[in-house]
Image (cartoon, coloured by chain):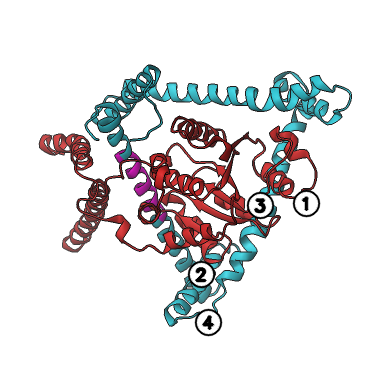
Amino acid sequence: MNGLFGTEPADGVATWVAAIATLVVLGALIGERRVFGWSQHLLAGLATGFLALLAITEVIVPRLLAPLAADPAGRADLWLGVALVGVTAAAPWVPRVVAAVPLSIAIGALAAFALGGAVVGTLLPQLAASVARPEPTPLATLAGAGAAAISGLVLVGFVHGAPRGRVMATAAGTGRWLMLAGLGGWLGYLIFSRLVLLIDRLAFLIGDWLGLMS
Amino acid sequence: MSDRRAILGRMAAPALLLVLAGAVLLPANIGLRLDRADSSASRGMNAALDRLPVDPMVLVGFDADLGTYAEVRPTVRALLADLLARGANLAFISLTPEGRALAIAELNRLDRLEANPRQIMDLGFLPGAEAALVALARGLGPNAADGTISALLGTTELPDPGMALVIGGNDLGPRSWVEQVAPRRESLEIVAVAPTVLLPELQPYLASGQLAALLATPRDGAAYRASVELGPLERLAEPVEPSSLAILLGVLAAVMVLGHSLGGGLASALRAVRSRETS
C-alpha cells in the first residue's frame, strides 16, 4: 500500500496506469520482452521530461531569469551564468576551446568538493576509527583489531608495481580475496533491497489495485 | 538441457511471484516478527530524537531512490510523523531530481492527510551536487556566511536546524552529508534512513559517531515503527506493515538459487578432476 494516490478519479487513473506498467515489467519474467522494452523507453522519456521540467520550473526561471528580470544591472554573476548556459547549449557549434570552459568548471568543482569531502569527512575519520584500540569488551577489541587487519590487507592488495617478497604477495592476495568477499556481501544486500521492492510491487497490485488487502 | 528442465526453468519466476503474492495476502506478522529482533538502531534513533530541543527545526534531505524507496518508505513516514508529533518543523530539500520527485509525492501525501502545514516547509530542489551541499552548510544558522543560499532557495530566512534527517538511496545521501556538511557544521546532528544496500557504506559512519543514528534495514525500521507512539498522527504512518513472511520466503529463494549455482559449479569442478584422474 504505497499511499501515494488519493481517492479522486485522477488518482484512480494513476493507480491503473501504475498497475499496468507493473504488470508489463513483471511480464518480462515470462518472456514478454517487446512491451517491456517499450516500458523502458517510456521510463527514459518520462525521466528526461521530468528533469527538463525541474530545471525550468525550479532552477532556470526562479533562480536565473526572474532575478535578472528584476534587476538586470545588479546581478553580474547571473549574466555569467547565462553565458555559461548559452555556451553549453551551443557546444556543437562553438570552438572546442570555448565549449570546454563550462564543462571544465563543472568537472573541476565536482572533483574538488568530492575529493576534499572524501578526505576530510571519510578518509581521516575512518582511518582514526580503524586503528585498533582497547574497547569496553574483549569481543569489541577483537573486532576492532580484525577491522584494522582487514583494512591493512585490502590496502596492500592495491599496491601495484612495487617490489614484493613472498609475505607481501600473500598479504596482497589475501587482501584481494577479502575485498571480493566484501563485494559479495554487498551484492547480497543489493538483492535484499530489490526483493523488498518486488514484494512492495506485489502488495501494490494486490492492495491498491485489486483492493484485496484492508 | 531437457525439455522438462527448460519448462521448469521458465516456470520458476512466475511460481516465485505467486508464492510471494500468497504470502503478501496473509497477515503481516505470520512467520517472522521483525520488530522483535535487535532494536539497538531503533533505540539510537529515539535517543537522537529525544535530544532535540522543544519545537525544533529539522532539515530533511530527501534524496531517496526510486529503486529502493519502497524499502524505507514505511520507516520514513513513521519518522516524519514522529517528528511532527514531537512538534518539530520540517524543512524539505532535495539535491537530486529523483529525490525531488519522491519528496513532492510525500509532501502531497502529507497535505492530503492534513498534516499541520505550519510545521512543513518545502525548500525545493537545490542543484549543484556536492557544491550545493557546501553552500547549504555555509548558509545555515545564525552565523551564515552570506545570503547566497537563501537567495538560491527563494526564502528570506533560512531556518537554523538542530538536526538533519537524510533520506538516502541516491548519489547524494548520508555519506555526502557527512563529508560536506558535517565538517562545516559540527553542531548539526545527522541522522539517516537508508536502504539495506547502503548499510556497508554507512555502518562505519555510525560506528565513528559521524552519524548520530541510522535505520538501514527492514528489521531496524520495523523495530523503530513498533517503538513510536504517534497518537492522532497515526494516520500519517503506513496502515499496513510489509509482509515479513514474503521477505523470508524471498530470501530463502535467493539462497536456494545461490546454493544451486554454487553446487553446480562445485559438481562440474569435481567432474573435471575425476575425468583428469581417470584419463
* Magenta stretch bounds: A186-199
Mark 4 neighbour class, 10 Å CA radius: few under 14, some 14 to 19, many 20 or more: few
Chain identity of mark 1: B
Q: Earlier in the sequence, mark 1 or mark 3?
A: 1
Kind of residue at badge 1: Asn
Relative depth, front residue between A12 and A164: A12
Kindly identify the residue that appears in the image at 49 percent across and 77 percent down. Answer: A145
Q: Is residue A12 above or below residue B106?
A: above
Relative depth, front residue between B271 and B262: B262
Give the colour chain A carries in the figure: cyan
Relative depth, front residue between A84 and A165: A84
Chain identity of mark 3: B
Q: Give the spatial CA distance, label 2 vs label 3.
A: 31 Å
Kind of residue at badge 3: Val
Q: Main secondary structure of the magenta part?
A: helix
Q: Which mark's residue is nearer the viewer, 1 or 3?
A: 1
Relative depth, front residue between B234 and A168: B234
Q: Give the spatial CA distance, label 1 vs label 3.
A: 15 Å
Residue A136: percent from left, percent from top = 48, 80
Kind of residue at badge 2: Leu
SS of the residue under disc 4: loop
Chain identity of mark 4: A
Instruction: Write down the residue under mark 3.
Output: B181
